[in-house]
Amino acid sequence: MVYNITKYSYDKAKKMGVKIKLSKNKTKKIDVFRNDKSNSKNNRKIVSIGANGMNDYPTYIKKYGLKYAKERRRLYKIRHEKDRHRKGSAGYYADKILW
């Protein structure tokens, strides 16, 4: 399954000051990079996020509508409560960019 990064995710990443690209890891959706505006070659990968094959907030909106997506987001945030607050972790970036 090929994942298409949504405008929602690009906007969230920009707001956080990071860049995102499709992941080179086949099991992940997105690679997150440090956004060094002074030298684009120094944009180092921070982490890979999003299990490929699993849905995320923008995908749920597209497939099932906003009401269902909001419920899935609520359940995701409960399920990942421990890891989504550790700044710099994969869980943190997944929560902020995909949910």
Image (cartoon, grey):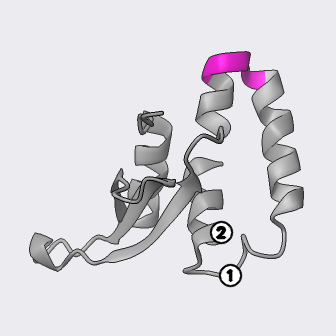
10 to the left or right of 77: left
Indicate the quadrant where residue 7 lies: top left
Amino acid type for the residue under numbered disc 1: Arg
x and y, in percent, of residue 24 in the image = 33, 57
Indicate the quadrant where residue 73 lies: top right
> Residue beneath label 2, please?
91
Q: Secondary structure at mark 1?
A: loop
Q: Which residues make up the magenta segment?
A: 62-66
> Residue beneath label 1, please?
86
Residue at image location 47% in from the left, 65% down from the top: 48
Residue at image location 45% in from the left, 35% down from the top: 6
Crowdedness near tag 1: few (<14), some (14–19) or many (≥20) residues, C-alpha within 10 Å: few
x and y, in percent, of residue 97 in the image = 54, 54
Mostly what secondary structure, the magenta segment?
Answer: helix
x and y, in percent, of residue 20 in the image = 36, 56
Q: Are marks 2 and 1 in contact (CB under 8 Å)?
A: yes
